[in-house]
Image (spheres, helix red, strand yellow):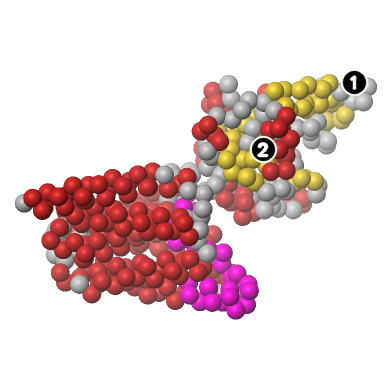
C-alpha cells in the first residue's frame, strides 16, 4: 500500500511537470531539435504520470500506450484545428510527386479524414476503446509514413532539392525538417510497436456498444471542430502571425527603436472625384494616386511622435519579418505596414481569383470606416494587376493592393479574403470573411 501511494505521488509530479512544459512550449524559440526533444520529454513525462497513477501494475506497457495515444491526439488535434493547413500540406506532397492536377481537389477532404482518424486512434488508445484495433491503426500509420519521410530526407541529401519543406505532422505547432521527422518517427515506432505486440494484455474499458457510441460522438465533435475552423478561423492559432504577436521589420525598426521617435509628413491632397481636400501622411500612408492628387501649393507639415516602449508581454511575442514582406510597384512597403503607430487594417486575398465575394461589401464598409478615421487600409495579394482590377470592378473594391507571397498570406490568416487589424506591428485581431466586424465593434477596438 505504501509503495502504491509513493508511485501515485510520483505520477502526479510527472503529470504536473508535463503540464508545466506544455504551458511554456510555445515560448521555445528553437523550432528544431530542441523543441522536438522537449515535446518527446513532455509526452513521456505525461505518459509515465498517467501510468503510475492509473495503471501501476503494468507500468512500462501502459507508458507505451499512453505515449502513443497522447502523441496521436496532439498530432491529430493540430490538424483538425487547422484543416486548411492540412490541405496546403497535402498539395505540397502532390506537387512534389507531380500528381497535383489529379489529386489537388481531394486535398481538403483527405486532410480532414487524416486528422479525424488520427485523433480517434489516439483517444481510443488513451481510454482503451478497442485497444487491439487502435494499436493496429497506430502501427499502420507509422509503417506508412516512416518510409515516406525517409525517402524525402534521402532524396534531399542526394539531389540537394527539397521536395517538401516539412512533413506537417504537427501542423504549425512544430515545424521539422525531413531528417528530424524521420528521427521522430523512429522514436514513436518504439512505443507503438510494443503497444501492438502486447495488445492482448489490454482489456476493453467498456462494452463494444458503448465504445461505438463514444467513438461516434467523438467523430462528430472532431468533424465539428474542423468545420468551425473552415467557416471561421482555427480556435487555436499555432502560426507566427497569431493575435498578440508584434511584427517587427528588421530594416525599419532599428532607427525607430534607437531614436524612439517616428516622423510624419502630412501633405494636402485633392479628391479627383469630389474636389475634397484632405491631409495624408505621405511617409506611412500614401493615398491612392488614382483618386487623390497632391497639392504642391500647401506646405508639407512635419510632425514627430515619441514612441511608447513596448510592454513586457509584447516583447516576449516579437516576430521578425523579412524585407519585402509587402511591396508595391517593386518598392518595399513593409515598414509602412508594421511600423505605423496608428491602426492599420489589411484585407488578405492570397489568390484574388479564388476570393469569396459574398462578404466583400462588408470589407468595403470597413475600408470606408478606416478612411473616415484616417487609418491605413491595404489589400494584400499575390495576384497580378489584371486580376486585381477585374475583382475591384466586380465588387466595388476601392482600396489599393500591396503584393506579397501567397504562402505568407495563407499563413497570416486562414481565409480568402480575411481581415487583420494591427497597430505598430502588434496584431490586435483577425477575422474570417464570414465574421467581418461591424464599425461599432471596430470603434470599440480602436479607442
Query: Is 185 displayed left or right of 364 in the figure?
Result: left
Front position in the image: 31 or 198: 31
Query: Is 135 left, or right, of 237 in this rendering?
Result: left
Q: Which numbered disc, 1 or 2, marks the residue closer to the eye?
A: 2
Q: At which x and y percent is residue 343?
A: 64, 29
Q: Is residue 25 above or below residue 200?
A: above
Residue designated by label 1: 298
Gap between marks 1 and 2, in whole Å? 29 Å
The answer to whether one can see residue 411 in this image is yes
Residue 124 visible in the displayed image: no
Residue 323: image x %, image y %?
71, 48
Q: Residue at x 51, y 55 (%)?
A: 31
Q: Is residue 201 left or right of residue 330?
A: left
Q: Which residue is mark 2?
A: 338
Label 2, secondary structure: give it: helix
Front in this rendered view, residue 370 or 408: 408
Tell me which numbered mark, 1 or 2, is placed earlier along the sequence. 1
Q: Residues within 10 Å of mark 1 (few under 14, many from 20)?
A: few
- Residue bounds of the magenta highlight: 149-173
Residue at 83% x, 36% y: name it: 289
Relative vertical location of residue 305 with respect to residue 245 in this rendering, above or below: above
Amino acid at each position: 500500500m505504501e509503495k502504491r501511494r509513493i508511485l501515485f505521488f510520483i505520477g502526479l509530479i510527472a503529470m504536473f511537470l508535463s503540464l508545466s512544459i506544455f504551458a511554456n512550449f510555445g515560448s521555445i524559440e528553437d523550432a528544431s531539435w530542441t523543441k522536438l526533444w522537449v515535446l518527446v520529454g513532455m509526452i513521456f513525462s505525461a505518459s509515465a504520470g498517467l501510468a503510475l497513477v492509473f495503471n501501476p501494475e503494468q507500468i512500462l506497457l501502459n507508458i507505451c500506450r499512453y505515449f502513443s495515444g497522447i502523441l496521436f491526439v496532439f498530432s491529430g488535434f493540430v490538424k483538425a484545428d487547422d484543416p486548411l493547413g492540412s490541405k496546403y500540406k497535402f498539395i505540397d506532397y502532390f506537387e512534389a510527386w507531380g500528381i497535383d492536377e489529379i489529386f489537388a481537389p481531394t486535398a481538403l477532404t483527405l486532410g480532414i479524414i487524416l486528422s479525424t482518424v488520427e485523433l480517434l486512434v489516439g483517444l481510443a488508445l488513451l481510454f482503451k476503446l478497442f485497444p487491439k484495433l487502435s494499436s493496429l491503426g497506430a502501427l499502420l500509420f507509422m509503417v506508412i509514413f516512416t518510409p515516406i519521410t525517409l525517402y524525402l530526407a534521402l532524396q534531399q541529401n542526394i539531389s540537394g532539392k527539397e521536395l517538401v519543406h516539412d512533413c506537417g505532422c504537427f501542423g504549425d505547432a512544430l515545424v521539422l525538417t525531413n531528417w528530424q521527422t524521420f528521427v521522430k518517427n523512429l522514436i514513436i515506432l518504439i512505443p507503438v510497436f510494443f503497444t501492438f505486440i502486447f495488445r492482448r494484455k489490454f482489456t476493453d474499458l467498456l462494452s463494444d456498444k458503448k465504445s461505438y457510441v463514444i467513438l461516434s460522438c467523438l467523430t462528430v465533435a472532431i468533424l465539428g471542430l474542423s468545420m468551425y475552423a473552415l467557416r471561421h478561423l482555427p480556435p487555436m492559432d499555432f502560426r507566427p502571425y497569431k493575435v498578440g504577436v508584434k511584427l517587427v521589420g528588421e530594416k525599419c525598426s532599428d532607427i525607430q527603436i534607437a531614436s524612439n521617435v517616428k516622423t510624419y509628413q502630412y501633405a494636402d491632397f485633392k479628391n479627383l472625384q469630389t474636389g475634397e481636400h484632405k491631409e495624408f501622411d505621405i511617409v506611412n500612408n500614401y493615398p491612392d494616386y488614382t483618386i487623390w492628387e497632391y497639392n504642391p501649393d500647401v506646405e508639407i507639415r512635419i510632425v514627430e511622435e515619441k514612441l511608447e516602449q513596448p510592454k513586457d508581454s509584447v516583447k516576449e511575442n516579437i516576430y521578425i519579418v523579412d524585407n519585402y514582406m509587402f511591396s508595391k510597384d517593386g518598392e518595399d512597403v513593409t515598414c509602412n505596414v508594421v511600423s505605423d503607430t496608428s491602426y492599420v487594417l489589411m484585407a488578405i486575398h492570397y489568390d484574388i481569383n479564388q476570393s469569396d465575394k459574398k462578404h466583400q461589401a462588408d470589407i468595403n464598409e470597413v475600408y470606408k470606416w478606416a478612411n473616415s478615421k484616417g487609418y491605413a487600409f491595404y489589400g494584400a495579394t499575390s495576384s497580378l494587376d489584371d486580376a486585381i482590377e477585374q475583382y475591384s470592378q466586380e465588387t466595388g473594391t476601392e482600396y489599393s493592393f500591396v503584393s506579397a507571397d501567397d504562402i505568407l498570406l495563407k499563413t497570416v490568416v486562414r481565409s480568402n479574403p480575411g481581415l487583420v487589424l494591427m497597430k505598430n506591428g502588434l496584431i490586435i485581431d483577425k477575422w474570417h470573411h464570414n465574421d467581418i466586424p461591424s464599425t461599432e465593434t471596430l470603434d470599440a477596438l480602436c479607442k
